[in-house]
Image (tube, rainbow, N blue to C red):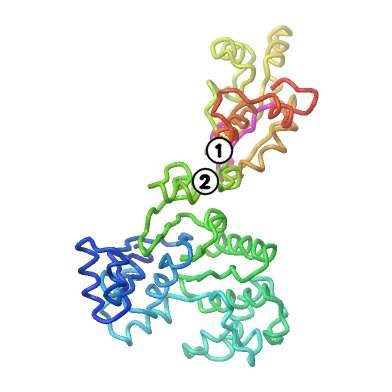
C-alpha cells in the first residue's frame, strides 16, 4: 500500500477559495487570483510516496512546498483534491479521526527544533508518547533508545539550552523516532544548521533510514541536499509540481527549461554513481575455465583483459593478456587469476567523484558489484574520463579523454590503461 497519496491537491488562501480552484482549472494564473484577493499556494499537486522511501519536495521560497507538508500533516485542510495516509483519507474526515491518524502514523521534525526549553532532553524526546498517553516507564525507555540512535546517549538529563544547534536538532529527530510512527515529515529540518553540522545530520539520516526504513517526506530549498537524500524528488515552482523523478532522471532528462536551468550547476559526479557509467565487457571468463578457453576469448573479443566470475556471479579476479600467454606457453592447466593482479571492486552506489582514487591506483578496470557482491559491469579508465567530460557544461562531448585529464588520473608517467 502507498504510504502517502495525493491526487489533485489545491490550497487556496482567501475568501471563497473554491472559486479560485475553478478559475485555475479554467486556465487562470496565480496573478489572476491575486487580483481577486486569493493566493494559490498549491495547485493540482499529485504524487505518491512508497513505504520506506525518502521523498524530497524541493523548491524555492514561495513554491508551495511548506504548505504541501502542512496539508500532509493535517494542519491545513485541502481546498480541493484527495490526500490519503496508508489508504485512510485525511481530506473530508472528522477531526477526531484526523487526530488519531496524526498520533499513530505521522511525526514531524521542524526547522527550528520546536523543543520545550523547560523540559529535559529526555522529556522532550518522550513528549509525543506522553501526549498519546503512554505510561512513564515505557516512554522513558523509548526516549532513551531514540536518543541513542541519534548519538545522544547519556544526554537525557540536560536542558535544550545547554546543547548546540546540531544536538538540538538530533533531539527533534529522536522525538519523532520515539513516537514510533511509520512516517516522518521533515520541514527544512537541516536548513538552520551550519554546513558541517548539516552534512553530519544528512549522513545520520541516511544511516538511520538504512536501519529503520521509515517513510520520509523531506522538504528543502537546497538542491544538493535534495539530490543527496532523495530516493525521488518533486521539483516545485509557483505552487505546481514541475517534475517527479530520481536525481538521475531529473539531471539527465529535465521535464522543462526551468528544471534544466535549476540543475545545470549541480556537480553530477556527486550525484551519479558507478552503476550509471558501468558497461558490460565483451566477454567474461568462468572461474572453472582454463588457459586455452581464456586465450580463445581474448582472441575473439580483442580485449586486453578478462574479468573472471564465479558461478554465483561474484568477481574472482582480472586476467591480462600476458597472464594467459604465459599459462598457455607453459602448458598450465589452471589460470593464476586469484593472485596475479589486485582487483579494484566498487559498490554500485559509489559516487563517480569517489572512483578516481581507485582508478589512479590500478591498471585493471573498476569492477562494479551490487549489494550482494554480484558482478554488474566494469569501468575502464577511459570510460570514467569520458563520462566526466560529458558531465561538464564547459567540456565538449568527445569520445576520447583529453591529455590533461589522462595525466590527472594516471600521473606523469602515463601508465598504459
Q: Which residues are magenta?
A: 364-377
Which of the two discs, 1 and 2, labels the residue nearer the N terminus? 2
Q: Quadrant of the C terminus?
A: top right
Q: Which type of secondary structure does the marked residue at label 2 adopt?
A: loop
Looking at the picture, how far across and down is residue 49, in whole percent? 39, 61
Dot 1 and dot 2 residues touching (CB under 8 Å): yes
Q: 399 left or right of 73?
A: right
Q: Which type of secondary structure does the marked residue at label 1 adopt?
A: loop
Using the image, determine if residue 360 lies above or below residue 109. Answer: above
Question: Would residue 351 be counted in the magenta stretch?
Answer: no
Q: In this figure, which residue is indicated by the disc labeled 1?
A: 393
Using the image, determine if residue 393 lies above or below residue 161. Answer: above
Residue 264, numbered circle = 2
Q: Quadrant of residue 47?
A: bottom left
Looking at the picture, how far across and down is residue 399, in whole percent? 56, 23
How far apart are the two marked residues, 1 and 2, measured between alpha carbons? 8 Å
**Neighbours of disc 1 within 10 Å: few (<14), some (14-19), many (20+):** few
Amino acid at each position: 500500500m502507498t504510504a502517502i497519496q495525493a491526487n489533485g491537491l489545491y490550497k487556496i488562501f482567501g475568501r471563497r477559495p473554491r472559486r479560485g480552484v475553478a478559475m485555475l482549472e479554467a486556465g487562470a494564473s496565480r496573478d489572476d487570483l491575486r487580483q481577486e484577493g486569493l493566493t494559490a499556494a498549491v495547485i493540482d499537486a499529485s504524487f505518491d510516496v512508497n513505504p520506506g522511501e525518502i521523498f524530497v519536495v524541493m523548491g524555492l521560497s514561495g513554491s508551495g512546498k511548506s504548505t504541501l507538508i502542512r496539508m500532509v500533516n493535517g494542519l491545513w485542510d485541502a481546498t480541493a483534491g484527495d490526500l490519503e495516509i496508508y489508504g485512510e483519507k485525511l481530506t473530508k474526515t472528522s477531526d477526531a479521526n484526523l487526530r488519531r491518524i496524526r498520533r499513530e502514523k505521522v511525526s514531524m521534525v521542524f526547522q527550528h527544533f520546536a523543543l520545550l526549553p523547560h523540559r529535559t532532553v529526555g522529556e522532550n524526546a518522550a513528549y509525543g508518547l506522553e501526549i498519546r498517553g503512554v505510561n512513564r516507564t515505557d516512554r522513558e525507555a523509548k526516549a532513551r533508545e531514540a536518543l541513542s540512535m541519534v548519538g545522544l546517549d547519556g544526554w537525557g538529563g540536560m536542558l535544550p539550552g545547554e546543547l548546540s544547534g546540531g544536538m538540538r536538532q538530533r533531539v527533534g529527530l529522536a522525538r519523532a523516532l520515539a513516537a514510533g510512527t511509520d512516517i516522518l515529515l521533515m520541514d527544512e529540518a537541516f536548513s538552520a544548521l551550519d554546513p558541517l553540522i548539516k552534512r553530519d545530520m544528512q549522513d545520520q539520516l541516511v544511516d538511520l533510514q538504512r536501519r529503520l526504513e521509515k517513510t520520509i517526506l523531506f522538504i528543502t530549498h537546497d538542491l544538493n541536499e535534495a539530490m543527496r537524500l532523495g530516493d525521488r524528488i518533486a521539483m516545485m515552482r509557483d505552487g505546481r509540481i514541475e517534475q517527479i523523478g530520481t536525481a538521475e532522471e531529473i539531471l539527465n532528462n529535465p521535464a522543462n527549461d526551468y528544471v534544466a536551468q535549476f540543475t545545470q550547476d549541480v556537480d553530477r559526479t556527486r550525484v551519479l554513481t558507478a552503476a550509471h557509467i558501468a558497461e558490460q565487457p565483451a566477454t567474461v571468463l568462468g572461474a572453472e575455465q582454463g588457459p586455452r578457453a581464456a586465450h580463445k576469448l581474448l582472441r575473439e573479443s580483442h580485449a586486453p583483459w578478462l574479468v573472471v566470475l564465479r558461478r554465483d556471479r561474484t568477481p574472482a579476479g582480472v586476467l591480462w593478456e600476458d597472464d594467459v600467454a604465459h599459462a598457455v606457453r607453459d602448458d598450465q592447466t589452471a589460470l593464476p587469476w586469484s593472485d596475479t593482479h589486485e582487483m579494484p571492486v566498487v559498490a554500485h552506489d559509489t559516487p563517480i567523484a569517489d572512483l578516481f582514487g581507485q582508478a589512479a591506483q590500478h591498471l585493471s578496470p573498476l569492477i562494479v558489484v551490487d549489494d550482494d557482491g554480484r558482478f554488474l559491469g566494469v569501468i575502464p579508465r577511459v570510460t570514467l574520463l569520458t563520462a566526466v567530460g560529458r558531465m561538464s557544461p564547459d567540456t565538449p562531448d568527445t569520445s576520447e579523454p583529453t591529455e590533461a585529464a589522462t595525466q590527472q588520473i594516471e600521473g606523469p608517467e602515463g601508465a598504459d590503461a
